[in-house]
Image (cartoon, rainbow, N blue to C red):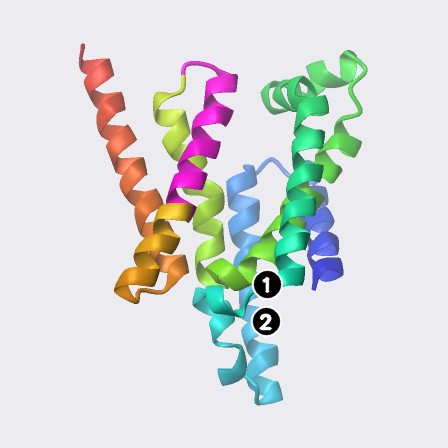
Amino acid sequence: MIIFAIGFALLLNYVKNKTTYGADTIISVFSSIAIAIGLAILAQAGNFNGYSSYLVGDILSITDTEIIYVFLIAIVVLVFWYFTFNKLHLISINTTLAKSKGVKTKKIDNIFVVLIAIVVMISIRWIGILLINSLLILPAASSRNIAKDMRWYHLYAIIFSLFSGVAGLIISYYYNIPTGPMIVILSGAIYFITLGIKGKVKGK
């Protein structure tokens, strides 16, 4: 699954660089197609019910080995982020300018999407296919509402993600609510709270 996700991510990145569409549009198109293909394959194999937990997530299905994988990939992501923060920032602002500064934009961009693909594939059994895209968007969107600069943007996104994950896990345990949906609900609540804060700041 991880190999498939990496190939899919690189193909997505290739299409993004060959078209003028925004990244959000390309991701939505590819994720919709991937989910549809996956569900069709499961239905044809007659094992759809056995994999229903992949749709909304099942925290109880996580093994010790997968937790170790998450820990290791988290370290890799942090190291990559530390050494490429400014380059990623420059690429996101102006790819042409980044190239003129000697930044290997394609290489860094491909590594970035591959890391995202691996994180998604490892986390998908926790959160679920239908909700994983929400967790990629909501914390970042919430952070954008109140962040003053790029560093605060990253910091707020991490804080919102950690809070939603931990609080969602605790609430789902005590109130018998699926973990994935609970985490997304909290992420959505944070988004609207930060949106309200943004509105008040602009109003002043």
Q: Residue at x 50, y 60 (%)?
A: 126
Foreground residue, 190 or 64? 64
| Residue occupied by mark 2 | 38
| Residue occupied by mark 1 | 34
Q: Residue at x 44, y 57 (%)?
A: 131
Task: Say which amino acid is labelled 1.
Answer: Ala
Alpha carbon separation for disc pair 1 and 2:
6 Å
User: Residue 180: where, in percent of width, then height?
Assistant: 41, 58
Q: Is residue 73 above or below residue 156?
A: below
Q: In terms of secondary structure, what is the magenta stretch mainly?
A: helix
Would you call the spot at circle 1 few (<14 residues within 10 Å), some (14-19), or many (20 or more)? some
Q: Is residue 162 above or below residue 169?
A: above
User: Residue 162: where, in percent of width, then height?
Assistant: 44, 40
Q: Say left or right for 95 vs 27.
A: right
User: Residue 179: where, in percent of width, then height?
Assistant: 39, 60
User: Residue 130: where, in percent of width, then height?
Assistant: 45, 61
Element assignment for label 1: helix
Q: Residue at x 70, y 14 (%)?
A: 97
- Cβ atoms at labels 1 and 2 below 8 Å apart: yes
Task: Say which amino acid is labelled 2.
Answer: Gly
Quarter-of-image position of residue 176: bottom left
Quadrant of the snapshot with the N terminus: bottom right
Q: Which residues are magenta?
A: 148-165
